[in-house]
Image (tube, grey):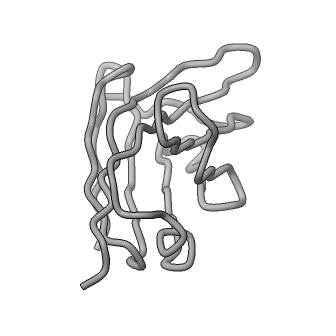
Amino acid sequence: MSATNELDPAGEYNFVIRQGDTFTRGIALTTGGTAVNLTNSSAVFTVSEQSGGTAVLTLTVGSGITMGSTAGTIGMTATATQTSGLDAGVYTYDFTLLQNTTVTTLFAGNLTVLGQV
């Protein structure tokens, strides 16, 4: 199951996932109710053990992130294999949008990984 949210830029959103599960989220970006044109844009989702630390999981366009061009949508998927590689615990993450020369952190927060049962 995926969730689609309309997010405020630089918002803080915390996620909880279970080790070994597929993690999927959908994002719709709008300005004043109109979809943001993401043509020629890129995005990066980076998970680290601590803020500014070494990345333990990185998703990019074509490798876990899909961009919806003029629809203003972004899909994000970490595979079961990728989440299996994360130890149970609390990580920090950020999701960055790159449009031409503009870099915007759309959202960031904590990613809690629950151990397998």
Q: Which of the 4 image quarters holds residue 115? A: bottom left
100 in relation to 107, above or below: above
Q: How far from the left and from the top, in percent, is residue 16?
A: 26, 56
Considering depth in this image, is 39 or 82 the residue closer to the camera?
Answer: 82
Q: How far from the left and from the top, in percent, is residue 116?
A: 31, 80
- Considering the image in quadrants, where does the N terminus appear? bottom left
Residue at the location (59% across, 55% down)? 65
- Considering the image in quadrants, where does the C terminus appear? bottom left
101 in relation to 60, above or below: above
Considering depth in this image, is 105 or 20 the residue closer to the camera?
Answer: 20
Q: Is residue 105 left or right of residue 26?
A: right
Q: Which of the 4 image quarters holds residue 21? A: bottom left
Number of numbered callouts drawn: 0
Considering depth in this image, is 112 or 29 the residue closer to the camera?
Answer: 112
Q: Is residue 9 left or right of residue 101?
A: left
Q: How far from the left and from the top, in percent, is residue 3?
A: 27, 59
Q: Is residue 62 left or right of residue 36?
A: right
Residue at the location (33% across, 54% down)? 89
Name the residue at the bottom extreme: 117
49 in relation to 61, above or below: above
Name the residue at the top extreme: 102
Q: Is residue 48 left or right of residue 102?
A: left
Q: How far from the left and from the top, in percent, is residue 36?
A: 49, 30
